[in-house]
Image (cartoon, rainbow, N blue to C red):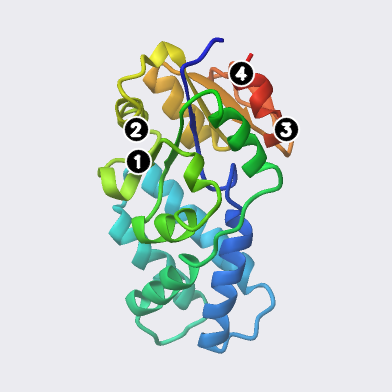
Amino acid sequence: MLYDAILIDADDTLLDFRGAEKNAISAIIQQLGIMDETAPQVYHRLNKACWEAFERGEVTQAELRVRRFRDFLKHYDLDADPREVGEAYTEALSHQSLLLPGALEAVQTVAAHLPVAVVTNGIPKVQHGRMDPSPLRKHLSAFIISGELGVQKPDPRMLYAALEALGGVDKSRALMVGDSLTSDIRAANRAGIDACWYNPEGKAAPPEYSIRYEIADIRALPDVALQ
């Protein structure tokens, strides 16, 4: 067996963040009285830009939580407190524990042989609220959240913290699995850890990334992790 531990991203790899985000933002849009059918897409675009700025270190997580709703409210020319709207959204999102198809089975199979750590960027209240009641949680040996650690992927310290939490696994004996090139794969490359890109949409990866494995279905993870 090549690996002693598997590190894996949460959102859009195991958890259905798109579905969770859609449900949570729909509740907020209804509260705000916005009638635009494209409002969820508007929020998604603005939120994605904020998270990309966060990954680049241009804003803090606290700033991100306000800025995305400041931009959203400005787009619709609404006079509301973006901080209050952001808190309402965080509360709504924290109750969205949706799994992607095959995620539970894949993690359960791997965890029967190797320790699995989830390594995720995000707000602790949201990530705990979604993961802790999930059937995935009992199969995890560690759960590393950027909001608790104080750094975020692609900072390699996120992955090093996971290896330490698993008892000091050597980086050469670990595999990082995730859907995001700029967050998961870049973090693995910076940490000197093998990378498995979960790429269900069949995108082409730029040549600057080092990717040892690529899977289109999370159900294929055990074949990679347990070979």
Q: Residue at x 72, y 32 (%)?
A: 216
On screen, residue 53 versus residue 36, left or right, reads left
On screen, residue 95 versus residue 154, left or right, reads right
Percent coordinates x, y for residue 191 in the rendering: 37, 21
Residue 151: which quarter of the image?
top left
Secondary element at tag 3? loop
How packed mark 4 is, by other alpha carbons closer than 10 Å (few <14, some 14-19, many 20 or more), is some
Q: What distance separates the C-alpha of mark 4 from that of mark 3?
A: 17 Å
Q: What distance separates the C-alpha of mark 2 from that of mark 1?
A: 6 Å
How packed mark 2 is, by other alpha carbons closer than 10 Å (few <14, some 14-19, many 20 or more), is many
Judging depth in this view, the residue of 65 and 177 nearest the camera is: 177
Q: Residue at x 48, y 53 (%)?
A: 131
Q: Residue at x 65, y 25 (%)?
A: 222
Contact, CB < 8 Å: mark 4 with mark 3?
Answer: no
Q: Which residue is mark 3?
A: 216
Contact, CB < 8 Å: mark 2 with mark 3?
Answer: no
Contact, CB < 8 Å: mark 2 with mark 1?
Answer: yes
On screen, residue 195 versus residue 16, left or right, reads left
On screen, residue 84 versus residue 206, left or right, reads left
Work out whether mark 3 precedes mark 1 in sequence or the reverse, and give the earlier one.
Answer: 1
Q: Which residue is mark 4?
A: 226
Give the residue type at disc 2.
Asp
Work out whether mark 1 precedes mark 4 in sequence or the reverse, and give the earlier one.
Answer: 1
Q: What distance separates the C-alpha of mark 3 from that of mark 1?
A: 25 Å
Give the residue type at disc 4.
Leu
Q: What distance separates the C-alpha of mark 1 from that of mark 4?
A: 27 Å
Give the residue type at disc 3.
Ala
Percent coordinates x, y for residue 21 in the rendering: 56, 63
Front position among marks 4 and 3: 4
Work out whether mark 2 precedes mark 3 in sequence or the reverse, and give the earlier one.
Answer: 2
